[in-house]
Image (cartoon, grey):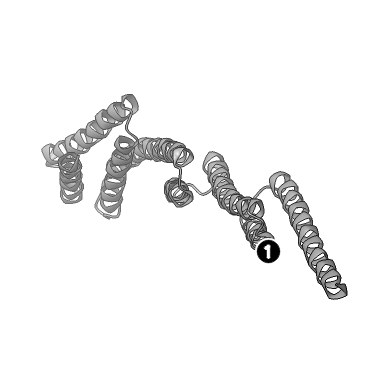
Amino acid sequence: VVMRRAWTRYLLDQGGESSARTSGEHHRPSGKSNSSSLLSAAWRTIQKQSEEADSAASPESHFEVFHLCQDYLSTTDEALRSNSLAAEKRIAIRAGQERVRALQKHHLLTWARDSSRSLTYEAQQRARTSDKIESANRALHCLESALKFYPGEVELNESSAAIRDFIASVKVAHWVELAERSAFKGHYRRAIERYKDALFYLSRETVKDEVRIPGAERIGREIELLQSRLQARKNGKTETTKDEGKD
């Protein structure tokens, strides 16, 4: 993979340098032809890797094509900054850039989508809360990396929101489970504190209202129930103390 990228970069650099040297020398058509052939070779390399990535199952292959496209665009941008570049050559390079930009977007979005799905599935299968959150954050990082290039992409934003909801639900479920265990053991004060921790994450994270509001109401009812039990326990102890005093 590294060698493929290095070779493509070499072709692009040679093409850019050649175009800058020969664009104004109309008496040397072979130089212009050589420049065009180098850029064509680089484009064919990208096309080949693009087709292989689309037929492969690995998200990373799409990420590699994205980098190849970046290399192509970077080098051709340098060539376009040359004042001596012929008009027809400039038009041809820009047309090539448009084709490469389309592939760049396709492969970055595919990488982000496939990688985030794989990591989200991995997060769902994890047993430990910390492992779930770690995998989900890695999925979120993939999407956010793509959003830096395409911030208006609806699918990326929706997927990011869904993963944030998942992370929030994992945190809330963790504290609710701890609260339920404490309540089962009769540790009502500890259970109340853990329910409050769950409420904290429920209100702090970006959770949709249709999830947050019912969840907060349920936790609120559990806290009220535990407070009633605490009060009943306190009253029971008070009555016992009074009875002992009478005896």
The 10 Å Cα crowd at callout 1, few under 14, some 14 to 19, many 20 or more, is: some
- Quarter of the figure with the C terminus: bottom right
Q: Residue furthest right?
A: 246
Residue 220 lies, in percent from the top left, at 76, 55
Residue 237 lies, in percent from the top left, at 79, 67
Quarter residue 155 falls in: top right
Above or below, comparing residue 136 to residue 46 in the picture: below
Q: Is residue 25 visible?
A: no
Q: In the visual, does 26 lie left or right of 119?
A: left
Q: Is residue 51 visible?
A: yes
| Nearer-the-camera pick, 11 or 197 | 197
The residue located at (20%, 44%) in the rendering is 12
Q: In the visual, does 236 lie left or right of 11?
A: right
Q: In the visual, does 202 lie left or right of 228?
A: left
| Nearer-the-camera pick, 108 or 77 | 108
Q: Residue furthest bottom?
A: 245
| Nearer-the-camera pick, 30 or 40 | 40
Quarter residue 52 falls in: top left
Number of marks:
1
Residue 68 lies, in percent from the top left, at 27, 42
Q: Amino acid at mark 1?
A: Arg
For disc 1, the marked residue is: 189
Residue 11 lies, in percent from the top left, at 16, 42
Above or below, comparing residue 236 to residue 131 in the picture: below
- Quarter of the figure with the N terminus: top left
Above or below, comparing residue 197 to residue 160 in the picture: below
The residue located at (67%, 47%) in the rendering is 208
Q: Residue furthest front?
A: 247
| Secondary-structure class at tag 1 | helix
